[in-house]
Image (cartoon, rainbow, N blue to C red):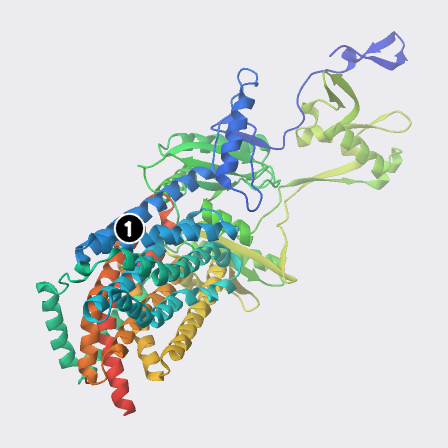
Amino acid sequence: MCPVLLDHYSQNGLVLLDDVAQVVKTTAPQWQRITADGRDAVLFQINQQPGSSTVEIAHKAQTQLKLIEQKLPAGIKIAKWYDQSDLIVASAFSVREALLIGLGLAIVTLLVFLRNIKVTLIAAITVPMTLSATVLIIHLLGLSFNIMTLGGMAAAVALIIDDAIVMIEHIIRRLREASGTYLERIHLAANEFTKPLVGSSASTIIIFAPLAFLSGVSGSFFKALSITMASALFISFIIAWLAVLLLAAHTLTQKDTEQEDNGTLTRWFHQQYQGLLQHLLPKPWLVLFGLLPLLATGFFGWQQTGSGFMPSMDEGGFILDYRAAPGTSVSETDRLLRQVETILRQIPEVETYSRRTGNSLGGHITEANEGDFFIRLTPFPRRNLDEVMDSVRDQVNINVPGMEIELAKLMEDLIGDLTAVPQPIEVKLYADDGHQLEQIATKVALALEKISGVVDINNGVIPAGDALNIQVLRDKAALEGLSPAAVKQALNNYLTGTITTQIQEGPKMVNLRVWIPKNERSTLSAMQQLRIRAPNGHWVPLKRIAKISTETGQAQISRDNLKRMVAVTARISGRDMGSTVAEVIKTLDQPSMLTNDVYYVLGGLYEQQRIAFHDLIIVFIAAIALIFILLLYLYEHFHVALSMMLTTLSAVAAVFIGLWLTDTELNITAMMGMTMVIGIVTEVSIFYYSEYQGLADSDTGISRMITAGNNRMRPIAMTTIAAILALMPLAMGIGAGSEMLQPLAIAIVSGLIVQMPLVLILLPVLLQAFTSFSL
């Protein structure tokens, strides 16, 4: 910068600015620091509008960035540090793969049982027909392909095949047994099966009606899944009722119906089944006694099963929030974070990362000692996400003391942002005495450290950084002819500088800031020597007219419902939320923990879990009530509806056993699967009782029940095995994003495993017992 002439004269003539000041070109004070992979960077975040396609936006953004990169100066590089569409595409591919694998396994099962290619193809072709119509409905409703919609279709495959199988099975049986022309027998089969098909389809569709009233996070997540499955099941009913009938009429011949369906193995099962029911039906207490191990094991499984909010999902990255000591400067915070970055670069699973200091991933400004990392991991194969997070946490805590950190998965962090409380554990302490509240909060935090699985504990006491308190001594300042306002203005000019003008530099204007040298304002002793000019022209040192003292930062004051509050927060690693919070409550309820005038309320994601569970329990009860009303409407006998509901509810015990054996948490996804089991088992029960009703009245009650069971044994076996195999890829968690629907699939498969014995054994026994009791 060229010398500038001052606008007044000295005894020796004009004074150049270079003679009295050092003129340097520098940057404006930095209160933020942004890096990517350890290098200073500028980060752009592209957010989508509601209803738009993430994949489409990402593709267009990449195209534009390639064009922009060609015009950038040398040395400037554009790099993608995170792309959510990668996970969406990978998850969609995994779900599609699970859908195709499950469909293939189900078709093989049908071919083994039916031993007829044409019949198998009729059942198989209903799946693409149903899914194509479902895609059209999804589009008309404004939904897009995502984990929930694709997962809903994958889960619905089992039920779609079920509808087709039972319809074809009944048509073939009527073609083989009934008299009349070919078309008359097909129409007879269709008329006979309309009522049970309507009832069974309604029993599975109706359970999704209460889900429409879910609110909050759980409602937002499962709205798409519910709409998808309800649409698929409705379309499946239409196709099974019309399309399967037409396909059978135009493709099947009399030869297809003459194939022997009672092989040696089937006849053996029928004989064993007949002997078993003949022994059990007169003695229903034997079945109830045999049911006790299932119920007892289910109760034990429920006690042993951990609970959580949402399924833990490996999205290939995580968030690391950090906080240095209060009042730490940007430069010192940056120095500490360079150590953290060194740790990250040494972990082989870390592919790339970005860091914000004085800012956050959400875009809001923070203190200079706070910020976050977004860390993206390498693709599989690698260690799982939890192991990598634990490794980072341990190394940072050991090697960077004084740096408080919190690690969160992407889904967990997103839900936390939506609910304004990102931590799973939040203990909100209330009291009138702020000092006492801080002491209790520190005590609670220390107690939480002793609980296994509780990590990233924050006592909630957030002090501000230390401050210099400059108190102007009015009497001494007045003797020097200075007022407090004049002293304040002089100090402001010295410490922050004064922008006197702007200089044009190319296309932009650069501020010209005048202030004193850094060494005269960077320490307490230097500030005490600052000289302030009095109105008469003499200079006064600051220490003569002011008292300078260091004031410890005060803790942040938070209020909740007008009550003074401090929130102690923590995260969970390696444990389920339910058992961990139960231990937290046990710790807090110790007599020596809280004083009489301090009380606590649990918040955080645990509170969201409690709200979601409450809503889903209401949905579960409503689904049971709606199905019970449906059964009363269909059969007009209370004991029939009650027998079916008791049979269905017994399958819930198997769900808890399955969750326990697979070490799966009871979360909102698993609870939704448990609710679906109610509809699925009821559907099979309706087919059994409809078969029972259709038999000749001349048979005795026991004989009719045995005959109905033998007639339904093969269809139930086919549909059960096909459904289990269709859901198995989802239950095994194959592919990216599969963790979201894995608990749902495990719950349904667990219920399907006991479906056949419950419907073929327990239901007849209950019907016989209630019938005998009513007589």
Say if residue 108 shows up in the picture: yes
Splitting the image into 4 quarters, where does residue 727 fall?
A: bottom left
Task: Name which residue type carries label 1.
Answer: Gly
Q: Nearer the viewer, residue 18 or 636?
A: 636
Q: Quadrant of the C terminus?
A: bottom left
Q: How many marks?
A: 1
Name the one closer to the observer, 306 or 488.
Answer: 306
Q: Which residue is mark 1?
A: 102
| Quadrant containing the N terminus in the rendered view | top right
The percent coordinates of residue 139 (x first, y second) are 49, 49
Residue 150 location in percent, x, y? 40, 49
Q: Is residue 332 above or below residue 407?
A: above
Question: Which quadrant would residue 635 be assigned to in this image?
Answer: bottom left
Q: Position of residue 63 (x, y in %)?
A: 51, 28
Which residue lies most toward the front here?
181
Q: From this viewpoint, which residue is outermost toward the right?
A: 536
Residue lying at the far bottom of the rendered structure = 775
Horizontal side, residue 358 vs residue 110: left or right: right
Percent position of residue 425, x then y: 47, 56
Residue 82 lies, with reference to residue 755, above or below; the image says above
- Between 440 and 356, the one lying in front of the other is 356
Residue 661 or residue 94, whichever sits in front = 94
Q: Is residue 42 left or right of residue 80?
A: right
Residue visible at 35% across and 63% down in the picture: 241
Q: Residue at point 68% right, 24% down?
A: 518
Q: Is residue 662 visible?
A: no
Q: Residue at x 12, y 68 (%)?
A: 269
Q: Residues within 10 Å of mark 1 (few under 14, many from 20)?
A: many
Label 1, secondary structure: give it: helix
Q: Quadrant of residue 632?
A: bottom left
